[in-house]
């Protein structure tokens, strides 16, 4: 059962606000939004359509959760869809900031690949879970330490299509 935590309309309103901030901050800059697959797919599609300045889109796949809800595995990064970011202002986009390992690792990776600047944007940040010191530059919502699905977030590759963010209750 999925209990709605953030309704669809609230997500859309907040994503539009983030888009306006990003648009203002990156005027005249060579912006590349690097979305971290698969969870940020829906966020990417909604966010970029609210931004009316030139931008490029790149994709990186990072996975650490293998279907389980709590234990993170080794971070596997696949950069085959990420074009050259050297000389670009990179905005890394992820669905959720949990322990912080994924974003912290990818920030270093983008800097190593010659990005002019690297900032981060997340739809959600879980409270009380961070193991790595990283503050997202753009954050949609802060949420309690619950496993969430929907709006791109999955459990065992399911539930990504839900238009809202919900808490997954696996009890029968
Ligand atoms: P870290 O711990 O590196 O994790 O900040 C970020 C990645 O972990 C996944 N994650 C979740 N996925 N519901 C999900 O569907 C959750 O509640 C959740 N918490 C963490 C997610 O892939 C994210 O990119």
Image: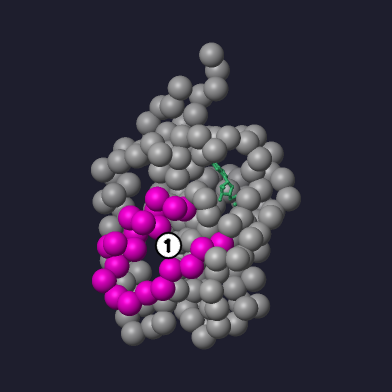
Region of the chain picked out in magenta, as a range: 40-60
- In the image, residue 154 sits, relative to residue 49, either above or below, namely above
The 10 Å Cα crowd at callout 1, few under 14, some 14 to 19, many 20 or more, is: some
Q: Position of residue 80 (x, y in %)?
A: 60, 66
Identify the image quadrant of the N terminus: top left
Question: Left or right of 89: which side holds 8?
Answer: left
Q: Position of residue 118 (x, y in %)?
A: 53, 74
Q: Look at the image and tell me whether residue 144 can be seen.
A: no
State which quadrant residue 61 falls in. bottom right
Q: Which residue is depicted at the point 60% across and 82% down? A: 114
Q: Position of residue 27 (x, y in %)?
A: 32, 80
Q: Nearer the viewer, residue 67 or 21?
A: 67
Residue on which the image places disc 1: 138
Q: Nearer the viewer, residue 125 or 23?
A: 23
- In the image, residue 101 sits, relative to residue 163, either above or below, namely below
State which quadrant residue 145 falls in. top right
Q: Look at the image and tell me whether residue 37 can be seen.
A: yes
* In the image, residue 135 lies in the stretch drawn in magenta: no
* In the image, residue 54 lies in the stretch drawn in magenta: yes
């Amino acid at each position: 059962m999925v209990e709605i935590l953030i309704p669809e309309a609230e997500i859309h309103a907040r994503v539009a606000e983030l888009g306006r901030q990003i648009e203002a901050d990156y005027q005249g800059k060579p912006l590349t939004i690097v979305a971290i697959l698969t969870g940020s797919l829906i966020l990417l599609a909604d966010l970029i359509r609210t931004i009316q300045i030139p931008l490029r889109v790149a994709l990186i796949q990072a996975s650490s959760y293998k279907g389980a809800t709590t234990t993170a595995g080794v971070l596997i990064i696949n950069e085959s869809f990420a074009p050259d970011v050297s000389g670009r202002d990179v905005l890394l986009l992820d669905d959720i900031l949990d322990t912080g390992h994924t974003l912290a690792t990818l920030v270093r990776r983008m800097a190593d690949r010659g990005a002019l600047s690297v900032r981060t944007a997340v739809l959600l940040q879980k409270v009380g879970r961070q193991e790595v010191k990283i503050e997202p530059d753009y954050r949609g919502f802060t949420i309690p330490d619950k496993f969430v699905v929907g709006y791109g977030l999955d459990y065992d590759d399911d539930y990504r299509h839900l238009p809202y963010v919900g808490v997954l209750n696996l009890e029968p």
